[in-house]
Amino acid sequence: MRRPFALPVPATALAGALLMSVLAVPASAADGNGDKGDRGDKGFTITDPRVAESSGLAASHLHPGIYWTHNDSGDGPYIYAVDSATGKTVATITLEGVGTPRDVEAISIGPDDRIYVGDIGDNLGGKWPYVWIYRLPEPKNLVDQTIRATQYVVKYANGPRNAESLVVDPKTGRPYIVDKNEEGGHLFEGPATLSSTHANIFRPVATVDLWATDAAISPDGRQLAVRGYFGGIYYAWNGGRIKREGQLDVPLQGQGESVSYSLDGTKLLYGSEGKNSPVQAVDVPGGGSKSGSGSGSSGASGAGGGGLGGNVKIGALAVAVLAAGVFGVRRLRRRD
């Protein structure tokens, strides 16, 4: 993935704005792991030292309270099942038959309970002539195992590009990609049925006003949430013909990379890179709709309440402000 660059914003103004963002982090997100009865709705911390660059997140369809994640570039063909009640990895899946992953950036689950892994990142800024999607069945048993996946070649109708967001329509199973562009990108629609014998062409169908690092569709198929490093937007999904509805309050995170709706569609969980990285939960805009299955991938958040949790120290605030000054963000292209 490509790191964001620093903006020419006065340090004092940036520090003040970021401090207010930190103070707005929900207390539940700062408290650490959720109780078992909450199934992770209060957030959790990924404790597995092997998962140091969590870059995608998807709520399991078959195992309530489990979230699938993976590392950024540099890891092998692995995905990890994390128990949101404890933050511990309960199963590691090795993908067989996909070659060597290049830059895995996203994960989603389709209506057929199949996991889609997006090897769609491009650290060269859009130079790869093609990227890949891997698809495998979600395992019924959470044990370390090897599962054969199908590899699909992906090309874009208007040329190569960098992307970190992959979603699957929970009703039709059609895949979509949001590219990562500093000035705002596009939602790309894939074929209704992916082909393993020839390239799958993804075509732009709508603009997305954000430098997107992940996205997710709500379990009921009504809402698309797109996140960036320090902001987000949610849209009416409309079968891929999206309509902007509002701006999200994304929790302040050191390197915000992932988002997923909870299985019941009432929460949005935001993840970031780093060892012992937190996954923070907030209410879905409009309250969401309870459902028996989630589409998972990455998602959006609504406004959360509460102040700083007792475990957040002043030193952490300073580090957050400094890190944000180094990373920086792009403004949304227009405000609501």
Image: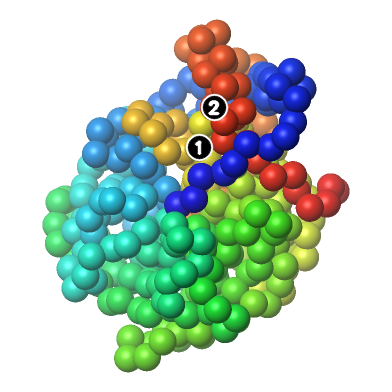
Residue denoted by label 2: 323
In which image quadrant can residue 188 be found?
bottom right
Q: Amino acid at mark 1?
A: Gln
Say which residue appears at 45% left-offset and 52% top-offset.
1
Q: Amino acid at mark 2?
A: Ala
151 to the left or right of 123? left
Say which residue appears at 29% left-offset and 69% top-offset.
136
Q: Tell me residue 36's x, y (percent).
A: 38, 31
Say which residue appears at 51% left-offset and 74% top-offset.
160
**Mark 1, other Cα within 10 Å: few <14 / some 14–19 / many ≥20:** many
Q: Examine the rendered structure and indicate whether residue 248 appears above or below residue 274.
A: below
Res. 218 visible in picture: no
Residue 117 or residue 310, whichever sits in front: 117
Tell us which disc is closer to us: 1 or 2. Answer: 2
In which image quadrant can residue 325 be found?
top right
Residue denoted by label 1: 255
Q: Disc 1, disc 2: CB below 8 Å?
A: yes
Which mark sits nearer the N-terminus, 1 or 2? 1
> Which labelled disc corresponds to residue 192?
none
Q: Tell me residue 76's x, y (percent).
A: 22, 55
Q: Tell me residue 313's x, y (percent).
A: 51, 9
Q: CA distance from mark 1 to mark 2?
A: 9 Å
208 to the left or right of 48? right
Residue 163 or residue 6, whichever sits in front: 6
Q: Examine the rendered structure and indicate whether residue 108 appears above or below residue 65.
A: below
